[in-house]
Image (cartoon, rainbow, N blue to C red):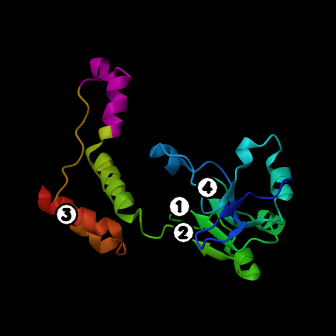
Amino acid sequence: MAPPPLQENPVGALNPLPQVLLLRHPAQFALINKPLPDHLCHLLKPWESPLPFDQFVLAHAQSARALLASGGMPVTADLIRMLPELRLVVTTSAGLNHIDLAECRRRGIAVADSGGVYSEDVADVAVGLLLDVWRRVSAADRYVRAGRWARDGDFPLGFKVLCSSLALYLMIFPVNECHGSLISFCYET
C-alpha cells in the first residue's frame, strides 16, 4: 500500500495528511456539485477500491485517524476495533444511534454530530405530516389515483386544523422544535 501523499499542510510543513475513512460517498457534496475536499486530509474512499469493504478497512487500519459516517451505515464495535488508530468519528446525521458510543467511550474516541442543525427542518416536516394526517391529504391522493372517486363518490374530508387542536398537542407532548413550528403555523392561519 502506498503511503499517503506528502502535501503542504496548513502550517506549512510537509507532512503526511491525516487519513479519514469515509464509509460512503457523502451526499452533501453531490448536492452542492463539488468534489470532496482533499487539501486538509487524505480521504479513504472504499467505493473506489476493487477490495471488499472489510479488506479495504484492514488495508488502512494503521493509518485511518478519523471516520466520517452518516445514518445509513452503522459504526459498530467490530468496525471500530478494526481501526486501532481511530481518534475521531464524525457523523453527518443528527442522531448517534448508528454509532457504538460505548466502544468509542471505551477507546477514548471523540464523536461529533451535526447537533441541532436539522432541528427546524425536521420540525417543519413533522408539522407537514401532522397536517397531512389531520386533513387526510395522502389518503385522498391514494383515493383519487386508485380511481375510487368515480365508483365510491367524493372522498370524506379530513379534520379542520384548529388552534385548539394545536394547543392540545403542545400540552401533551414534551417541548421540542415542533412547538415553535406549530405555534408559527397557528398564528399564520
Residue under label 2: 113
The residue under label 4 is 38
**Is residue 139 located in the magenta-colored stretch of the structure?**
yes
Range shown magenta: 138-153
* Relative side of 62 to 99, left or right: right
Q: Could you tell me which secondary element the residue under label 2 belongs to? A: loop
Quarter where residue 17 is shown:
bottom right
**What residue appears at the point 21 percent right and 66 percent down from the top-left corner?**
183
Look at discs 1 and 4 and give the one toward the viewer.
4
Is the residue under label 2 in contact with that under label 1 (CB below 8 Å)?
yes
User: Marks 3 and 2: which is nearer the front?
Assistant: 2
**Main SS of the magenta segment?**
helix
Q: CA distance from mark 3 to mark 2?
A: 28 Å
Whole-angstrom CA distance, mark 1 to mark 4, is 21 Å
Q: Which disc is residue 93 wearing? A: 1
N-terminal label among 3 and 4: 4
Task: Kindly identify the amino acid type of the residue bearing the numbered disc 2.
Answer: Asp
Q: CA distance from mark 3 to mark 1?
A: 26 Å
**Marks 1 and 4, the one that precedes in the sequence:** 4
Is residue 24 placed above or below 174 in the rendered structure? above
The amino acid type, in three-letter code, at marker 4 is: Asp
